[in-house]
Image: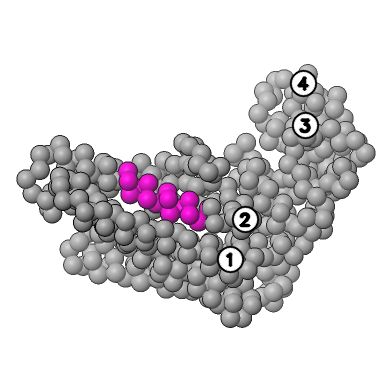
Amino acid sequence: MRGIHIVRLFGIDISIDPTWLIILFLLVWSLGAGFFPTLYEGWPVAEYWVVAVVAALLLFGSVLVHELAHSLVARRHGTPVGGITLFLFGGVSRIEREADAPGREAVMAVAGPATSAVLGLFFLGLGQLVAGPQTVHALLMYLGVINLVLATFNLLPGFPLDGGRLLRAALWKLRGDMLWATRGATYGGIAVGLGLVALGFVLLLGGDFLGGLWIGFIGWILVQSARSSYDQAVAQHALSRVRAARIMERPKGYLPPDATLRGAVEDYFLELDARCLPVGAEDHVEGLVCLSDLRRRDRGDWGREEVREVMVARDDVAQVDAKASAADALQLMMSRDVNQVAVVENGRVLGFIDRGRLLRYVYLSRGRERGDGEEGASRDAERTSRDTDRGVDKAA
């Protein structure tokens, strides 16, 4: 989730997802038409809406500070941060690698709720000191309470909430097995999510349609996020144990830089059944061309345009060292937003890894660990890889 870039703070890119505008509108509406008029009577109508807008923006500012705390602590512990995105359910820090020890996991997890709690107490204390005007007092008290609610909600023991990450850190410390701890914290996340769904259903039966629907929806999202986060943790764990050179695909052939695009398709891509091919020779790779690059060109020009005109130059191709882990290759793909990387050794291109190969390795690894057998796992992996390839081709 990357969104629309708006600003850079402390070296971290801040973005907003289009869904953020939806929740901003709903929040302003609920505050301006319901919350403040119910608690504070007699204000001019325009004043309710002004305070509602300011309160909503400051709430998201508080969410941003919460996520910045996570990101800054993660970066201090050597964990790369891809940025922060504000979206429908608040915000998310794109921390690109799992913590390598339970202590660091706990510190990174607790940073956000602790920051929200401090903000809540600060706003409440300031609200007690500021007697008037009433609009300012109301704004400060709202921000104080909502930040404390935010801190409390995030401390629920369900992965991937901060409380779930604290639970994982405790289980990890207890047994020394990160995957086992992640599985336990995931069960917590599913339990918390189902509990919220049940609460939402009770509210619906009680007549609170909007509140019940919203809480139930949050619970359902939490259940899905718990499962997704567990799958990501399993993938990272599996890929961290194998070197990039082990699972790379060696080039099936090399494209002459002066070949026409039509010749490249007919004589190389179709004959070799390849999606991407390096340009040049084994001892001198000049660049890389994928079918997706060709699809961006007018087919009528394929007979005269040459490969060198559409290739991605070697220096612009994402590269990972052969001795690096496959997890490093995945992290590079995510940070560069690409679907494959070149595997190099002493400046020489040995092969390539794409997302499909990473997925196949993860599925095969999980199949062996569960005892499902490689045949069934391989079928799942191939199916996932085909789906991924279709997605890449469609996007191209």
Q: Position of residue 253 (x, y in %)?
A: 87, 40
Let me know if residue 200 appears in the view: yes
- Left or right, 46 with reference to 311: left
Marks 1 & 3, CB-CB < 8 Å contact = no
Alpha carbon distance from label 2 to label 1: 10 Å
Q: Which residue is mark 4?
A: 305
Q: Which residue is mark 1?
A: 104
Q: Which residue is mark 3?
A: 313
Q: Secondary structure at mark 4?
A: loop
Q: Which residue is mark 2?
A: 79
Q: Position of residue 262 (x, y in %)?
A: 78, 27
Alpha carbon distance from label 3 to label 2: 29 Å
The mark nearer the N terminus, 1 or 3, is 1
Q: Looking at the image, is 70 positioned above or below residue 340? A: below
Q: Looking at the image, is 390 positioned above or below residue 242? A: above
Which residues lie in the magenta part?
Answer: 57-71
Q: Is residue 355 magenta?
A: no
Residue drawn at point x = 13 percent, y = 54 percent: 39
Alpha carbon distance from label 1 to label 3: 39 Å
Label 1 neighbour load within 10 Å: few <14, some 14-19, many 20+: some
